[in-house]
Image (cartoon, grey):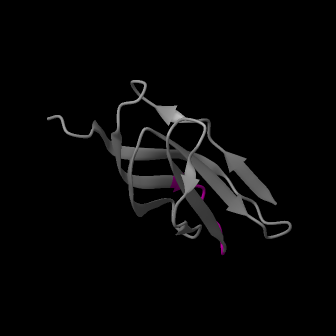
Amino acid sequence: DFDVETRDIQGDAEQMKYYGELSVFLKKQIAGDLTVTPSLGPLDEEVAQTPFTATMTRGRRRLGRIGAGEAMSLKFENDVIDQDVVLEGFEIDPVDNVGRR
């Protein structure tokens, strides 16, 4: 059982951010999936968005764009008993202020 949530990721207080494409880096496994659920909204009031599914048979997976909000967090889940999950990292690119260039 694997269940990990990141702390809130935010920039300037009350500044809307655009969180771009999410990539996860996993240790390759024979089988299995990792569910990644982004949450967006005001700090400490984020609302869960549509989850992404990362196949653990590949080392790096591009999952999709997250969206816009003042703060963002990620929840990583795998509920298969006795299945190894090694999350080596994640990347969100780009992260920009909304309305600025």
Q: Is residue 41 left or right of residue 77?
A: left
Residue found at the far right of this picture: 81
Predominant secondary structure, magenta span? loop
Which residue is found at the position 50% from the left and 39% from the top? 42
Residue 7, horizontal then vertical, whole percent: 61, 35
Residue 74, horizontal then vertical, whole percent: 57, 49
Relative to the observer, which residue lies in front, 31 or 17?
17
Which residue is found at the position 51% from the left and 60% from the top? 59
Q: Is residue 28 above or below residue 15?
A: below
- Inspect the magenta stretch and tell me whether residue 27 lies in it: yes
- Inspect the magenta stretch and tell me whether residue 73 lies in it: no
Residue 5, horizontal then vertical, whole percent: 67, 46
Residue found at the far left of this picture: 101
Relative to the observer, which residue lies in front, 89 or 12?
12
Q: Is residue 5 left or right of residue 61?
A: right
Q: Is residue 22 left or right of residue 28?
A: left
Relative to the observer, which residue lies in front, 5 or 43?
43
Residue found at the far bottom of this picture: 31
Residue 85: image quadrant is: bottom right
Q: Is residue 79 above or below residue 68?
A: below
Number of numbered labels in the structure image:
0
Which residue is found at the position 82% from the left and 60% from the top? 1
Residue 81, horizontal then vertical, whole percent: 85, 68
Q: Is residue 77 above or below residue 100?
A: below
Residue 6: image quadrant is: top right
For the C terminus, the image quarter is: top left
Relative to the observer, which residue lies in front, 57 or 34?
34
| Range of residues picked out in magenta | 25-31
